[in-house]
Image (cartoon, helix red, strand yellow):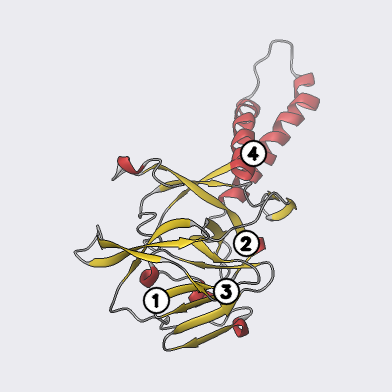
Amino acid sequence: MNFALILFLLLVFTGAVALADRLVFARRRAPGAKEPWWIEYPKSFFPVILIVFFLRSFLVEPFKIPSGSMIPTLLVGDFILVNKFAYGIRIPIVNVKVVDVGSPQRGDVMVFRYPEDPSLDYIKRVVGVPGDTVSYVDKRLSVNGSELPLRSAGEYQYLERRTFARQFVETIDGREHRILLEEDAPSTPQFVKQFPFRGNCTYNSSGLTCTVPPNHYFLMGDNRDNSSDSRVWGFVPDANIVGKAFFIWFNFGEPGRIGSFQ
């Protein structure tokens, strides 16, 4: 469901009714006569929809984490806020950038439209920006020939099942985040799709190396062995960017997680 489009259509409809009433219908009503319901309701909802549309399109947008690909940073059921202007101001619906405020940086957690189906929103961590050479070999991530620092952080137990993964703290451009690795999982994706600029990547039994094309980004989930990401379906074009995730505002199962992400 394209909620942004639905919201836009509601905004146009309620605004058109309010304008028509102001220019035509109000002048035809007798003084003191009550507005008919089909005018009163749209006029009442118009300012509310306008505020929601503006906030959601240009400032912040709420999302719910649907999968475990970003564990341990983000859990299934986390409700997060996404900064819509961190990477530039875009025209709603068509997502065309009109004001260049900034660009994604390595280490950012970014929401984007899935390249294979733009109606779906995905969330992953940026590990490669345009021009970078990203390597993931034997489960060690390198960017432009430099292996990212990694230190052990004990074990992590999945909440939904009685299994464990090894937990590490990875550092990219001076910023730390936690990742999960499972020793028995392969380093190379079992299935790699055909995607634009597929020729920029080479795969072997130890892993992969990709050169990020202009205006594209390479993203990976923090739950490295349980994430379908750029290793599988390729690069994320700038046109698909939604915004930068920065805040957990609620979790029904774990209220203590509120505000734990930035």
Question: Can you identify the residue that label 2 sits on?
Answer: 240
Nearer the observer: mark 4 or 2; the answer is: 2
Q: Where does label 4 land, which residue?
A: 54
Q: Amino acid at mark 1?
A: Lys
Tell me the element at label 1: loop
Say which amino acid is labelled 2. Answer: Asn
Mark nearer the N terminus (2 vs 3): 3
Q: In this view of the protein, can residue 192 be seen by the observer?
A: no
Q: Nearer the viewer, residue 75 or 91?
A: 75
Say what secondary structure mark 4 lies in. helix
x, y percent for residue 171: 45, 61
Q: Classify 10 Å Cα crowding around label 2: few (below 14), some (14-19), many (20 and above).
A: some
Residue 160, given in percent of the width and then of the height, sits at 24, 59
Please give the name of the residue rendered at 58% of the width and 72% of the height, measured from the top-left corner: 235
Using the numbered discs, state the Cα–Cα distance from disc 1 to disc 2 in whole angstroms. Answer: 27 Å
Between marks 4 and 2, how big is the CA–CA gap? 20 Å
Mark 1 or mark 3, earlier in chain: 1
Q: Callout 3 environment at 10 Å: few (<14), some (14 to 19), or many (20+)?
A: few
Q: Label 1: which residue? A: 139
For marks 4 and 2 on the same chain, the one whose residue lies earlier in the sequence? 4
Which residue in the structure is indicated by mark 3?
A: 144
**Alpha carbons under labels 1 and 3: distance apart:** 16 Å
Image location of residue 123, percent across then percent down:
49, 59
Task: Looking at the picture, tell me which residue is in the foreground, 144 or 245.
Answer: 144
Query: Furthest residue to the bottom?
Result: 204
Provide the secondary structure element on which disc 2 rests: helix
* Mark 3 or 4, nearer chain start: 4
| 227 on left or right of 23 | left
Closer to the eye: label 3 or 4: 3
The 10 Å Cα crowd at callout 1, few under 14, some 14 to 19, many 20 or more, is some
Q: Is residue 162 above or below residue 97?
A: below
Q: Residue at x 62, y 85 (%)?
A: 199
